[in-house]
Image (tube, coloured by chain):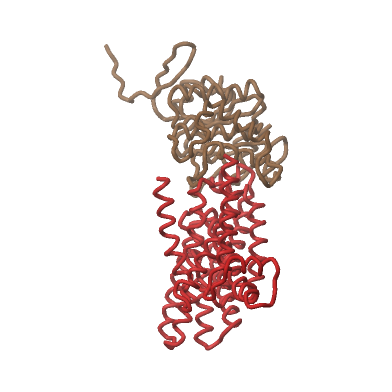
Chain colours: A red, B brown
């Protein structure tokens, strides 16, 4: 059993690496794979080097970090909320960020200001959900989930209001933010730092997360300090989600489905599930974003549309294979 | 030694037991008997440090249970819960291995002795053949035995079992009780279990806690408490004693008895 899980993990890592390379290879300017490899091994200042290192590599790196963050947040929230339908956005973090970002756009702000506003919105959502639902003695995950869902519904209404108030020229940019879009990706380095740190924390907690999936009382009898673990997972997953939102907007589907995809491959142990989800989520989003760049070139599609269009058939195949 | 000191347990609007005191020593097997809602599960949770009593306390080896860290406590005391949340996606072996969590020394993977303990526990419950089946595909009785196996893998000195026999067929009830007796008599563990069947309580428990409706609780040697009169008072219905093969068993009888002659 252990062997098989290790092999699956290595396979996922290889596929993610391959996706990375394809992301560098494909684009509006045709490059041969030899030229891309050369540019990778020996960076130079010619056109190929510039396309690979300055245009495509940051974009691919952003997509990978974003996908990894979303899949990690989804896996964490699914065990925290004891709900297979949980995704990174279920607790209203994306709604808060969207209200912040769209509000900033409506006020005519651009660039970093939008990100700052989105971050403020996300933090507000994280704070409100926590304050309303938290009880020190017994943090009921259903109250937490319902609080998040309610807040999301409220944010959804505000988002609709902002869209209807916005001048039509601004609406397209807003829709791209809402659907998820990596063409304006910023803060890629910060996203990678968060991804690596959060992955290590999640790996260190993986044993306790496995026990937590048995329920709070059972986890307590098996030596898990449930309250502190829940706090770490809630704030960790929220921070991870907020980071992904800063980079790529509200890209859907990755966070919900990638962890389940890994489970359907037979990996349920969080020691394997965490690295598997991070690698698969990152690789998956790189592929989706590359297609978003090249399918309609030179037009760019919002990547959030492609994650769903690609992911739904893959998940349906995996589901029918198992059941 | 696991000690309840002047333990008073309450749920909103009701006192379940008042000033209950008893001490469970290694090698002893205690049974908790009482009607539905009399506080059996609440008592198990209080003994396991999962619920704060209204007053009084629980101590393990003379030290208040609240002073133990969760992990430290879990190495010494294991709890078989009556109900467990669903949501575990893995197989039987992975589930039983989680019993080793309080003993885990590294963040990554299990040590060989963890795997040995899990395998031995599975074999003891005759489950080695389904070790790699998904937990979700098991029947209720199989799942109950898997949960007992997890408790064995945890290897605590003090075991609290809330209805260990639920969902088990007659043969597996017997095998489970024989196994639990072996744990107490043969391996010197201390057991406290919630039971409904007087047959098992009478034959396997050396001490009893009787939780009467209304908050009165009695504890002591089974020889004193396992009597026709005290059980009728406990359950609030007429009982008939049936016996044979040296076993005493009480079955409920309808109040309207038919007297001939």
- In the picture, the quarter occupied by the C terminus of chain A is top left
Outermost residue to the left: B261
Query: Where in the figure is residue A161, as x and y percent of width and height?
Result: 42, 81
Query: Where in the figure is residue A114, as x and y percent of width and height?
Result: 57, 81
B128 w.r.t. A269: above or below: above
Does residue B44 appear anywhere in the picture? no
Query: Where in the figure is residue A212, as x and y percent of width and height?
Result: 57, 48
The front one of A192 and A36 is: A36
A105 w.r.t. A261: above or below: below
Q: Horizontally, is B140 left or right of A236 in the view? A: left
Image point (51%, 21%), residue name: B202
A126 w.r.t. B199: above or below: below
The count of marks equals: 0
Does residue B63 appear anywhere in the picture? yes
The front one of A194 and B58 is: A194
The front one of B243 and A146 is: A146
The front one of B169 and B161 is: B169
- In the picture, the quarter occupied by the N terminus of chain A is top right
Image point (57%, 41%), residue name: B45
Query: Where in the figure is residue A276, as x and y percent of width and height?
Result: 57, 53
The quadrant in which residue B224 appears is top right
Q: Horizontally, is A46 left or right of B86 in the view? A: right
A276 w.r.t. B25: above or below: below
Image point (50%, 49%), residue name: A263
Q: Horizontally, is B260 left or right of A146 in the view? A: left
């Amino acid at each position: 059993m252990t062997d098989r899980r290790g092999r699956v993990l290595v396979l996922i890592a290889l596929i993610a690496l391959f996706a990375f390379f394809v992301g560098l290879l494909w684009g509006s300017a045709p490059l041969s794979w030899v030229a891309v490899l050369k540019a990778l091994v020996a960076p130079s200042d010619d056109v190929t080097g510039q396309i690979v290192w300055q245009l495509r590599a940051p974009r691919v790196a952003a997509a990978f970090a974003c996908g990894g963050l979303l899949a990690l947040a989804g896996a964490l929230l699914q065990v925290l909320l004891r709900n297979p339908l949980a995704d990174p956005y279920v607790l209203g973090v994306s709604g808060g960020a969207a209200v912040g970002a769209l509000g900033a756009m409506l006020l005519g702000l651009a660039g970093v200001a939008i990100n700052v506003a989105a971050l403020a919105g996300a933090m507000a959502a994280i704070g409100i959900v926590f304050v309303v639902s938290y009880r020190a003695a017994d943090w009921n995950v259903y109250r937490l989930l319902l609080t998040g869902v309610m807040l999301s519904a409220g944010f959804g209404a505000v988002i609709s209001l902002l869209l209807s108030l916005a001048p039509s020229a601004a609406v397209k940019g807003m829709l791209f933010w809402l659907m998820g879009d990596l063409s304006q990706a910023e803060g890629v380095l910060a996203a990678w730092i968060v991804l690596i740190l959060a992955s290590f924390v999640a790996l260190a907690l993986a044993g306790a997360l496995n026990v937590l999936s048995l329920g709070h009382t059972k986890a307590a009898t098996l030596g898990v300090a449930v309250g502190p673990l829940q706090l770490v997972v809630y704030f960790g997953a929220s921070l991870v989600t907020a980071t992904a939102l800063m980079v790529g907007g509200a890209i859907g589907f990755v966070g919900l489905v990638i962890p389940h995809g890994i489970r359907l491959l037979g990996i349920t142990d969080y020691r394997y599930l965490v690295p598997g989800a991070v690698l698969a989520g990152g690789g998956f989003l790189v592929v989706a974003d590359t297609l978003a760049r090249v399918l309609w070139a030179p037009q760019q599609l919002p990547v959030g549309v492609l994650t769903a269009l690609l992911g739904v058939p893959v998940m349906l195949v995996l589901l029918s294979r198992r059941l | 030694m696991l000690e309840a000191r002047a333990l008073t347990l309450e749920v909103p609007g009701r006192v379940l037991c008042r000033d209950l005191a008893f001490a469970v020593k290694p090698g002893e097997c205690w049974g908790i008997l009482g009607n539905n809602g009399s506080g059996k599960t609440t008592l198990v949770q209080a003994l396991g440090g999962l619920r704060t009593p209204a007053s009084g306390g629980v101590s393990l080896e003379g030290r208040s249970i609240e002073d133990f860290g969760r992990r430290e406590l879990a190495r010494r005391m294991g709890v078989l819960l009556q109900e467990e949340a669903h949501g575990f996606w893995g197989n039987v072996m992975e589930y039983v291995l989680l019993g080793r969590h309080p003993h885990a020394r590294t963040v990554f993977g299990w040590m060989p002795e963890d795997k040995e303990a899990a395998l031995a526990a599975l074999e003891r419950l005759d489950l080695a053949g389904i070790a790699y089946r998904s937990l979700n595909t098991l029947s209720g009785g199989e799942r109950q035995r898997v949960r007992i196996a997890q408790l064995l893998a945890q290897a605590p000195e003090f075991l609290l079992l809330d209805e260990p026999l639920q969902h088990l067929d007659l043969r597996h009830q017997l095998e489970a009780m024989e196994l639990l007796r072996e744990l107490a008599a043969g391996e010197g563990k201390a057991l406290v279990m919630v039971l409904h069947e007087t047959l098992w309580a009478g034959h396997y428990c050396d001490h009893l806690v009787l939780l009467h409706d209304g908050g009165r609780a009695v504890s002591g040697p089974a020889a004193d408490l396992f009597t026709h009169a005290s059980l009728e008072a406990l359950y609030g219905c007429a009982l008939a004693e049936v016996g044979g093969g040296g076993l005493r068993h009480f079955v409920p009888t309808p109040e309207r008895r038919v007297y001939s002659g």
